Image (spheres, rainbow, N blue to C red):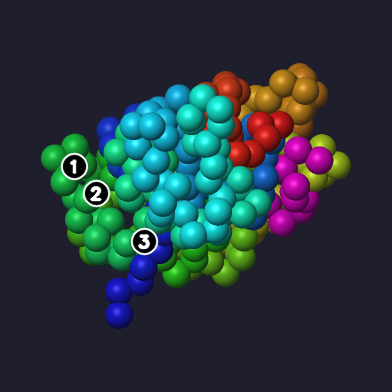
């Protein structure tokens, strides 16, 4: 049987997430809750609704969502704009299908590995130089382990280059199974300070560091790029960055790069009814 998983985006012509020209496949589900996460729609493992209030054309002109909601989670404010009570919403997704303005839309869909690779392969003209390919990201790709392995196996079958972007918080068995199917790994190391890591991501960094060290020992020839997003107040001191650089600098085959922090995801939190920390 084909293995299916939940995806929330396929981004074409990416130049910054692996060598060459990449097609990014973003999987839903992540065990961490980083305060700066720019893809909050990736955190839950299931499809969910995203509501952009500024697109709502109002009750007088529409009101379809009110009719479709069986949980009484939707009401309209005095200006006639829809308001969603997330405490009542069960993500049945009925309201999104009837929204003509696309103010309410579904984030995430289910697909098989073969269906995803059919989409990826449409860009195969860019992979013929053998440097580009597919990069599986998230969320956390290790979270959907069976689907991740199926994607990588299908990509290899079609001679498409493979990479994953991972925070490393997951089963090492999955990472070990994925390694022979990968050309490279983009590995996030956010902080070596465990107390800070717990406070800002919701998880300890112990498993992340352990998995990285095991991967370096077991797969010395696998290309590994350690990436650190620079977040103000969290890891932006010289001491924080030097600690990570020193940790990886003597490991063969490992490179290190920093990524600029940004707030581009702030609007998504409002659309999901969440606080942007």
Quick check: marks 3 and 1 in contact, CB under 8 Å? no
Numbered label attached to residue 176: none
- Lower sequence index among marks 2 and 3: 3
Q: Quadrant of the N terminus?
A: bottom left
Q: Residue at x 72, y 21 (%)?
A: 232
Residue designated by label 2: 120
Q: Is residue 106 magenta?
A: no
Q: Nearer the viewer, residue 277 or 246?
A: 277
Residue located beneath label 3 in the image? 110
Say which element carries label 1.
Answer: loop
Look at the numbered discs 1 and 2 and tell me whether their residues touch, using CB distance below 8 Å: yes
Give the image location of residue 104, x and y in percent: 42, 41
- Element under label 3? strand
82 to the left or right of 152: right
Answer few, some or many: residues within 10 Å of disc 1's Cα (few below 14, many 20 plus, some between 14 and 19): some
For the question of whether residue 136 can be seen, the reply is no
Q: Where is residue 196 shown, x and y percent of the image?
A: 82, 37
Q: Is residue 173 left or right of residue 199?
A: left
Q: With 74 as the anchor, is 203 left or right in this view? A: right
Residue 193 picture quarter: top right
Q: Which mark is residue 123?
A: 1
- Where in the figure is residue 63, as x and y percent of width and height? 39, 41
Neighbours of disc 3 within 10 Å: few (<14), some (14-19), many (20+): some
Q: Main secondary structure of the magenta part?
A: helix
Task: Give the extent of the magenta segment.
Answer: 199-208
Q: Residue at x 35, y 71 (%)?
A: 3
Q: Is residue 95 visible?
A: yes
Disc 2, SS:
helix
Query: Residue 26, how many percent across, how many down?
Result: 42, 47
Nearest the viewer among 125 and 223 is: 125
Q: Quadrant of the C terminus?
A: top right
Which residue is situated farthest in the right direction here? Answer: 195
């Amino acid at each position: 049987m084909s293995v299916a998983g939940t995806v929330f985006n396929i981004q074409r012509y990416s130049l910054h997430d692996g060598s060459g020209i990449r097609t990014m496949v973003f999987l839903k589900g992540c065990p961490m809750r980083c305060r700066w996460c720019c893809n909050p729609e990736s955190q839950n493992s299931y499809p969910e609704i995203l509501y952009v209030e500024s697109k709502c054309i109002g009750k007088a002109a529409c009101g379809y969502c009110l009719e479709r909601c069986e949980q009484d989670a939707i009401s309209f404010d005095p200006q006639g704009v829809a308001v969603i009570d997330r405490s009542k919403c069960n993500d049945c997704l009925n309201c999104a299908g009837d929204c003509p303005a696309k103010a309410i839309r579904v984030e995430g869909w289910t697909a098989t590995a073969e269906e995803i690779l059919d989409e990826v392969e449409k860009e195969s003209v860019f992979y013929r130089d053998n440097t580009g390919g597919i990069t599986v990201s998230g969320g956390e790709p290790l979270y959907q382990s069976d689907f991740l392995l199926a994607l990588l196996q299908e990509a290899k079958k079609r001679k498409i280059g493979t990479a994953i972007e991972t925070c490393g918080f997951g089963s090492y068995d999955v990472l070990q199974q994925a390694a022979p199917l990968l050309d490279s790994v983009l590995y996030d190391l956010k902080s070596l300070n465990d107390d800070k890591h717990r406070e800002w991501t919701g998880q300890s960094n112990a498993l992340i560091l352990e998995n990285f060290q095991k991967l370096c020992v077991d797969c010395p020839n696998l290309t590994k790029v350690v990436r650190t997003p620079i977040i103000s107040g969290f890891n932006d001191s010289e001491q924080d960055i030097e600690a990570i650089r020193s940790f990886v600098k003597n490991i063969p085959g490992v490179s290190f790069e920093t990524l600029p922090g940004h707030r581009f995801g702030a609007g998504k939190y409002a659309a999901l009814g969440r606080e942007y920390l």
